[in-house]
Amino acid sequence: MRGLFLTHRFLSALLLTVSLPTVALAETESSYEARLVASTDAVVGADWSDALSGINSLTADYPLSRIGHLLKADLLFWLSGQAGAGQTGASIAELQKQLRLRWNHAKTFEAKKKLVPAKLLHLSEAIPFVLYVDLPSSRLHVFAQQSGRLVRLSDYYITIGRAGFGKEREGDLKTPVGVYRINGYIPGGQLHARYGVGALTTDYPNALDRFLNRTGYGIWLHGTEPGWVNRGPRASEGCLTLSNSDFEQLLTQLGSHQDIPIVIDDTPQWIETQDLDQAKKVVLASITASASGLAASSNHHAALTSGYGPDEGARMTDLVLYPGKKERALARWIGSSEQEGLFAVEQYWHRTDDGGWTMILQTSEPAQTPERLTADLARLNSSAKPLAH
């Protein structure tokens, strides 16, 4: 009986929790993860029969699940009185971290499932989806826009760079922090086997990265190489990786849509939707007040010629608090003028010590997809006012 007690205590310590009722997972959660967490829950709950049955079934269906085999080995070692056997090595530690992250996500999901990321203040209604990466939790969340609101569709465990996050230079093995776009798809058959079933490419380095002299390239979302279901939480060269089955499900969800934003956040905060609306109004009012009186700073006639930033003929389509060590914001505008016709502007703002904002960079926004451009123009023409605040 002492061995059984120690098993329970070991996994409780590993997962940084105590024995809990079975954790309810989202309906969109992958079958693999749901079964892995349920088996772990049975171990922590000292339900040895269900634990062994669940783990045996899991490893039979997913023979490449190293974390499943580790969990089974741990349980068998403890049940046989060989406490702590085999619990050494960096690879074992990474698998344990993966299990802890998955467990903590399941444990907190119910409390967070109706919350939204605090940094996503406003996104163009022409954007059907946004991908949001919670780096500390090694989690990719998929949100859809429905009636102007963000609705969570699914979330996936991910692996990030071996050296963590905050990419600054090529080869530093870190995952970038910032706001990017999914700008392409490459089938797995055209890639090395390490990319798994395929890859979604991003536009790293973006305009701000280049302005800050950050280097590197080829930051993708992709599958996992043969021999694994998932790697540990920090195992890539800077990319975001999913299991092959999760990557395929993500592709199915996104469909043929292009120009999908992906926000990679090092300090995530989750808030109620109504609180997000209020935060949007506060930040927008502060930025537009700071812009008042500034002179034009680019070739675009509408750069900064009124209290709204761009002139009254422009509309703000996106406003995102930019992830990173410094407090910044990204604002995108679209508009038209007799002199220059259609224009799109991307602005990066920095929070000043007095609570105001100063613009540190303005660029012509990269070409939008025809689908989004048409939708944004329709909204621009239907209202002469920028985003309400």
Image (spheres, rainbow, N blue to C red):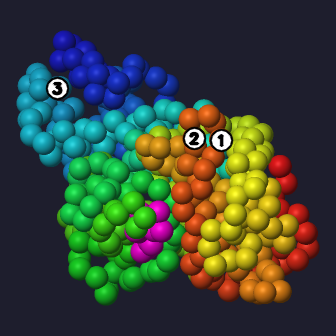
Q: Determine whether 102 is above or below 257 in the image.
A: above
**Label 2 element class:** loop
Which residue is at a point 23% across and 58% down the rendered structure image?
A: 173
Q: Position of residue 111 (x, y in %)?
A: 60, 32
Classify residue 196 by image quadrant: bottom left
Kindly identify the amino acid type of the residue bearing the numbered disc 1.
Answer: Gly
From the image, tell me which residue sits under label 1.
356
Q: Is residue 367 among the parts visible in the rendering?
A: yes
Q: Position of 381 compared to 63: left or right?
A: right
Which residue is at a point 81% across and 82% down the rendered structure image?
A: 337
Q: Is mark 1 in CB contact (under 8 Å) with mark 2?
A: yes
Q: Which mark is residue 352?
A: 2
Instruction: State the extent of the magenta-drawn residues as a range.
Output: 200-209
- Could you classify mark 3 by the number of other residues whose Cα lies within 10 Å: few (under 14), some (14-19), or many (20 or more)? many
Q: Which mark is residue 160?
A: none
Classify residue 307 by image quadrant: bottom right
Q: Is residue 205 magenta?
A: yes
Q: Position of residue 376 (x, y in %)?
A: 76, 75
From the image, tell me which residue sits under label 3.
78
